[in-house]
Amino acid sequence: MVTGLFDVHFRLRKIQANGDPLTVLNQVVDWEIFRPDLEPLREKERKSNAGRRPYDLVLMFKILILQSLYNLSDDALERQILDRISFNRFLGLSLGDSVPDAKTIWLFREALGADDRARLLFDKFDAFLRENGLQARKGQIVDAAIVQAPRQRNTREENERIKNGEAERVRQEWTPAKAAQKDTDARWTKKNGRNYFGYKQHDCVDVKHKMVRNYSVTPANVHDSNEFLGLLTGNTSADVYADSAYRSAWHVAALDGAGFRPHLQRKGARGRALTEREKRGNRTRARIRARVEHVFGVMRQRMGDTVVRTIGFVRAKVKIGLRHLAYNLGRFALLAGGVA
């Protein structure tokens, strides 16, 4: 079949007519706001002008956003960019343009982890949201979710030594090839009777817009409450919602002292069941807290946030940070398009 001069144009127009979220994203986001925070990645002086010029920084950043939105590996991402014309349009590439390969994508993401630059980019977009009328409103919800990492097949002795702070010494005893595939930063934890290995994302979501306004990443064994107060951000309301894992006399007093209104779920104990009034209070708070589950649901179903296939805390932090930024970008596109 002969390809016509305007066939690609007609195909793209049909994709847009059927609802292309990437087109909306390009329409509502000024990608150039990220360039100043990306420029330091290229400050290293080139030794020679020989060879191919490096890819544009904003282009590489948008590629990582695509990866987070669609939960793609580096190799799968390269294939999809080569294959999907909607991805090419989002990136501003023509069919004749060079496409970064998987190794280039991996190296760029590694560079983001060198000085926690993914966090800087997240904060830049949050500032953009606030400047464009999407301030955090109606209170904030704090919750955490486990992000699993590839399980390690270490000996009991190795696991015990890693747990006791001897991770670096253990790594030195392994061959370089083995050490490169071993994650000594992730930790085990138990939830609802099941064991998990990996990390934990701690999120603060605003009630009105369901945007992630702050987040942190820790090994999975860190208790949710340890990150609680540090996650709270500026909001038009002093209301703070969280589940019973965050309730303690100390936290309630700290929230009161900082001018917040705590709405923390109550939990019964042996010999002390919840009163009917406390149960009603839990149900009322649960209706608000459910909004954070919507956020986790989007990340889980579309972005695969329950697993991070990286080795080490720094790489996991970059991956999880980019997922949070990609979620906020997608959520902003929905709100800008009039979808609540």
Image (spheres, rainbow, N blue to C red):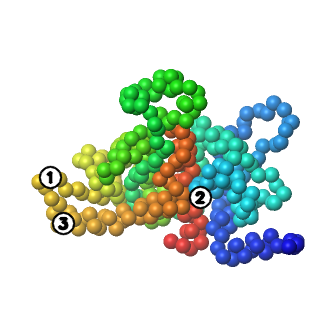
- Please report the residue visible at 65 percent of the width from the left and 49 percent of the height from the top: 74
Image mark for residue 270: 1
Q: How far from the left and from the top, in percent, is residue 192?
A: 31, 52
What kind of residue is marked 1? Arg
Distance between the Cα atoms at labels 3 and 1?
A: 18 Å
Residue 139 against residue 190 in the figure, above or below: below
Sequence-earlier tag: 3 or 1: 1
- Under mark 3, the amino acid is Arg
Query: Given contact means CB atoms under 8 Å apart, are the residues at marks 3 and 1 in contact?
Result: no
Q: Nearer the viewer, residue 209 or 298?
A: 298
How far apart are the two marked residues, 2 and 1, measured between alpha carbons?
Answer: 44 Å
Q: Are marks 2 and 1 in contact (CB under 8 Å)?
A: no
206 lies left or right of 29: left
Q: Is residue 282 above or below residue 75?
A: below
| Quadrant, the N terminus | bottom right
Q: Is residue 336 above or below residue 75?
A: below
| In the rendered image, the vertical position of residue 227 relative to residue 69, given as above or below | above
**Of marks 3 and 1, the one in the foreground:** 1
Mark 2 is on which residue type?
Answer: Leu
Residue 261: quadrant of the picture = bottom left
Q: Earlier in the sequence, mark 2 or mark 1?
A: 2
The residue drawn where x is 27% and y is 51% is: 247
Report the residue marked by disc 2: 69
Residue 185 in view, yes or no? no
Of the two numbered discs 2 and 3 in the rendering, the one whose residue sits closer to the viewer:
2
Any part of residue 174 in sight: yes
Q: How many marks?
A: 3
Q: What element does badge 3 sit on? A: helix
Image quadrant assignment for residue 29: bottom right
Near mark 3 (Cα within 10 A), the count class, few <14, some 14-19 or many ≥20, is: few
